[in-house]
Amino acid sequence: MLPSPPAREGQLGFLYLPPYRVQGISVAGEQTVIQIPELDLAFDIGQCTRAVLSAPTIALSHAHMDHLGGLPYWFSQRYFQKIGGETHMPDKGDGKPRIPVGRCICHPELEQHLRGMMRAWEPLERQKTPFDIVPLAPNSDIEIKNNIMLRAIETRHTVPSLGYAVLERRSKLKEEFRDLPQEKLRELRASGIDITRQMEIPLVAYTGDTSPGEFLVRDEFADAKVVISECTFFEPDHNDRARTGMHLHIDDIIRMLPVWKAEAIVLVHASRRTTIHYARERIEALAGADASRIHLLMDHRSNRARYEAQVAAANGAASGATKAAENPRPESQAEIPETQA
Ligand SMILES: [Zn+2]
Ligand SMILES: [Zn+2]
C-alpha cells in the first residue's frame, strides 16, 4: 500500500466584521497570529503566514513560542521581499537608502531578549536582518495609523504579558461652544482658546493569553467594537486547568458578556482537543441571546457561510444601482486568504 500524502497545512480563519477583516490562525500552544489588515496590524506571530507579511506592525502579547515563533522569519521575509513602505524604517541618519523592515511592539521586559534573539541570527546567516523592536509600557500608546493608537494593557499570564486596545482619536467641539457660529469659533481659536476636547473611541481590543482580571472591564475592553479574546478551555471541568495555565475559560467569557458591548467577540486560542462543534455547542448553551455575537476564528464552516451571506447581501444591494457606492469593500493592500477568495 502506498503511503498517504501529508495532511494539508492549516487554513487561515477569516471573519469580515465591517469595517475590519480578522484573519489568521490560533490554536493554543501551537500558533497564534491574528491580522487586521485595515489597521495595518497583527496581534502575535506564532507563525509567519504569507498573509501576515503585509502587516507592518506586530503587537506581541507575550513571548511564548506559539505567539512569537514567526517573528524572525517575518523580519527576514519583509526584508528579503522588500515589503513595506517608508513608514516604519529605522532612520540611521547615514543618508543611505532606508531598508523596509517591520516593527514589533512588545512588553518592555522583552525588548532586550528579542533584540538578542535577532542578533543571534547574524552569525548563523552571516548577514544582518534589519529589525525594529519597540517596547510599549503598560498604559502607554503608540500611533499605528493616522489618529489610530495602539495602547498596551498589562494582563496576567505565566510570563510578562500585554493585551492591546486600538483606539481612534477624534477631536470634538466642547459642549459649551456647540451653538456658536463658525466665525465666532474661528475668533476663539485665534485667541488661543482650546475649543475642542480629545475623544478616544475603542475600536478593537485583544486580550492575549491571560487569567481573568480587572483589566478586562476597562473601558478599552468594555467599549471596543470588536473584542478578540483568548478562550483556551470550554469543558465544564477544565476551570482549574485554565487557572493553572493562566488562561481564560468559556465561563470567564460568559461573565464578561454584560460588560463587553462589542458587536463581535472573536474567540481564539482554543486548544486542539476542543472541536469547533463542541465549542459552538457550549457557547449556544451558556451565552443565550449573546451567542450570535460570539465568533470562533477557527470555525471555518460558519465563518464562510457568514461571509457568503455578506457577499450576497452586498451584491443584492449593488443591483439596487444607487446603493452600489456603499458596498463594503476590503480596502487594504493585503489579500483575502485564497480559500475565501
Ligand atoms: Zn498561547
Ligand atoms: Zn501563553
Image (spheres, helix red, strand yellow):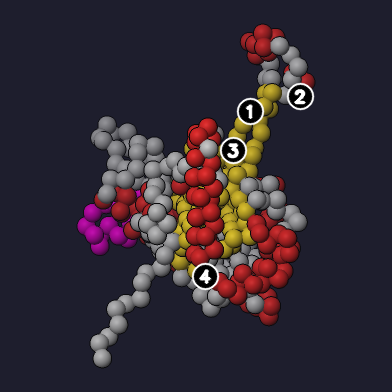
User: Is 143 situated left or right of 284 in this image?
Assistant: left
Q: Residue at x 46, y 44 (%)?
A: 330
Task: Give the CA distance from mark 3 to mark 4.
Answer: 30 Å
Q: Quadrant of the N terminus?
A: bottom left
Task: Please give the residue where the numbered disc 1 appears in the rendered image.
Answer: 171
In the rendered view, tell whether residue 63 sits above or below residue 88. below
Task: Please give the residue where the numbered disc 2 appears in the rendered image.
Answer: 175
In the rendered view, tell whether residue 217 sits above or below residue 267. above
Q: How far across and down, in percent of the image, does residue 219 sit?
A: 70, 47
- How would you rate the neighbour count of disc 4 (Cα within 10 Å): few for under 14, some for 14-19, many for 20 or more? many
Give the amino acid at mark 1.
Answer: Ser
Q: Quadrant of residue 268?
A: bottom right
Residue 168, label in figure:
3
- How would you rate the neighbour count of disc 3 (Cα within 10 Å): few for under 14, some for 14-19, many for 20 or more? some
Task: Give the CA distance from mark 3 to mark 2.
Answer: 20 Å
Q: Are marks 3 and 2 in contact (CB under 8 Å)?
A: no
Task: Give the CA distance from mark 2 to mark 1.
Answer: 12 Å
Q: How far across and down, in percent of the image, does residue 30 sit?
A: 46, 70
Give the amino acid at mark 2.
Answer: Glu
Q: Provide the residue span drawn in magenta.
A: 119-137
